[in-house]
Each structure stands twice: as structure tokens, then as C-alpha cells.
Image (cartoon, rainbow, N blue to C red):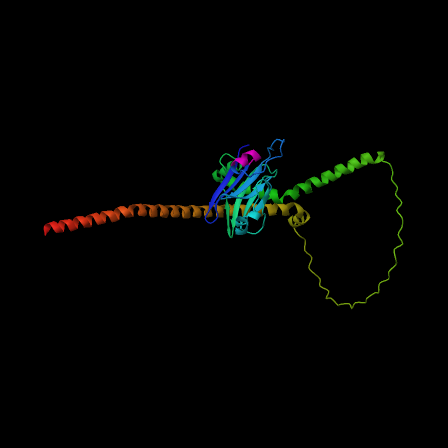
Amino acid sequence: MTVETWSIIHPSLGRIEVSTGTEDELRVLDPGFPQGKEGKQSSDSPRLLVRVGDTVVARKKSLTNTKIDLSEKTLDDPEKRPAPGEYSHQETVLKPFLEIESNWADTWVRSITVRIRDTAVLLDAPVGSRAGKRQQAMERSAFKRWLYPLLGGVGKGGWALGVIILGPLVVRLLQRLWQWLSPYLPDWEINLPSIPWPDINLPSINLPSIPWPDITLPSWDAPWWVEFLAEYSKVWVPVLIGIGIGIVTIRNHRRSERTKREWEETQAAGTDAARADIAATLHAPATRAAHVFRARIGQLAGQEGQ
């Protein structure tokens, strides 16, 4: 596999880079990345490296979902960052953090989000990667832009659906297997000793009776769809939660694109201002020299006229 690097330039944190690859590949980017024991071949399993500027803030041995702390304490404290040759990272649920989501098998990173205060910005996936092809498909097709997040949300909340559907089938299979094996198994009879537990008589308490009013509610026959939803709530509730997660993902993607455009405009304005300052600084000495030269020529011309 080849190294895949996600990157973004944050206005306050600077460049954030997330790289995935093997131990040998990531060691080219980070000389302190752990390596296998001597005499053993390096593993080809994907590893994770997170850097903020030139600082390594996380090294992970797998691509499992995680939230990596990006607070000032973690970035400024060397003890909270991984030491050379070790896997380590600070995980948190409080912002700011870097949220990494992988596929169900943890073989490739699906999305990376920077969450700081009220902003959530998605990093652009590397060109040619599976995540990059997924993002391109979502950008080209409005249908896939809705479908992929919805499927991801249903996948998160709908795992119980498979358990509910496959559960009865597994139970029936085990029952038939037990019926087939039970005649061949010996009868086990275990006589456990009886324990003479003490007989404790607790006092009885007579509580006063409260004359509750007798309310007769009107009879109402629920429609068939209400009965269906009540009976199969374990099926549709996870799916509904998954659809909600998908809709939130779509909304976050729109906000992310808007925030990234604002960052790019701010960076472009800062770059233009810096270039103007440099040009003014370079042009100022020449302008002053020209003014001095012209003033001196005027003085000489005046002296000759006298």
C-alpha cells in the first residue's frame, strides 16, 4: 500500500496532516514511528500518523474510529504526545478534536473531521484513494450526496436490524442441533446439598387505602399501522435513528464546505495583504531616492540660475 495523506490548513492551528500507511512508509515521514522487533518482518497492516505542523500528536496501530485531542495542553505538553518509537494519542470527547471514521473493517479511513467550537470541517481525501473516489462521487451526483451518508447512518443504527432478523433463525438452528445431539448425550444428574436457610418473619405494615376515582376511558381501536409500529419497534427505530444520523451528516457537510470557503478567502486575503506589504517595502526606498534626486536637481538648477 502507499501512503495516503489528508491535510488542511487551520487558521489558528496551522497545517493538520493525517497519514495512513505501513510502518516503513510512515517512518519516512516520521523517523520516530515505531518499527517491528528485530528479526521480524514489518507488518503490512495500515497504521495512522497525525501531525499538527511539525509536531506529532498521535500514532495509532489501527484505523479504528477515534477522537484525537487537539487542545493547547496536548499540543504544548511533550508528555501528552507520543514519544519516539511508541504508539500513543490523547483521546477526548471535548472539542477541539480530530474525529477519524473508518469503514466497518477498519482497513481504510472513510472521513476525517476537525471539530473546534461550533465548526466541523471535513478534510479533503487524497486523490485516487477510496475515500477520495467516494467524495468525488458525492460531489458529482446529488443522489449519491444523499445516499452515501444515509447508508452510513443506517449502517450505524441498523445493526440491530440484522440481529433481530437473523436472531430467530440462529435460535431455530440451535434448537434443531440440540434435538439431534440430545439423544447421544449422557444423562447428567447432580444432587446439590440443601442449605438450611433461616426463616425470617418480617412485620406486616398496614398502609391506608386511597380512594382513587374510577375513570372510564373511551374505547379506541388503533389503526393497523400503529399496531405494526408498536409490535416491530425494534426494527424501525434503529433505521429511523440511522436516517437521522445520515441527515445530520449531510448538514455537517454543507457547513464544512461553507467554512472551508471562508478559510480560503481569509487566507487569500492575508496572502494578498502580505504581498502588498512586501511590494510597498521594496518600492519605498526607490521612491524616496527618486524624490531626493529630483530635489537635488532642483537645487542645482536654482544655483545655476543665480
The reply to whether residue 113 is visible in this rendering is yes
Q: How many marks?
A: 0
Describe residue 68's horizontal placement relative to residue 259 as left or right: right
Please give left or right for residue 232 compared with residue 56 in the image: right
Q: Can residue 124 be seen?
A: no
Residue 63's quadrant in the figure?
top right
Q: Split into 4 quadrants, where in the image is the N terminus?
A: top right
- x%, y% of residue 130? 53, 35
Furthest residue in direction left, as rendered: 306
Part of the protein shown in magenta: 21-28
Q: Residue at x 49, y 41 (%)?
A: 7
Q: Is residue 300 left or right of residue 276?
A: left
For residue 284, above or below residue 213: above
The majority secondary structure of the magenta stretch comes to: helix
User: Residue 126: x percent and y percent?
Assistant: 50, 37
Identify the image quadrant of residue 217: bottom right
Q: Residue at x 15, y 49 (%)?
A: 300
Q: Is residue 160 magenta?
A: no
**Percent x, y for residue 54?**
49, 43
Closer-to-camera residue (132/237)? 132
Question: Front-most of 175 and 223?
Answer: 175
The quadrant holding residue 160 is top right
Locate residue 62, reporting x and y percent.
60, 39
Examine the structure image and report whether residue 22 is included in the region drawn in magenta: yes
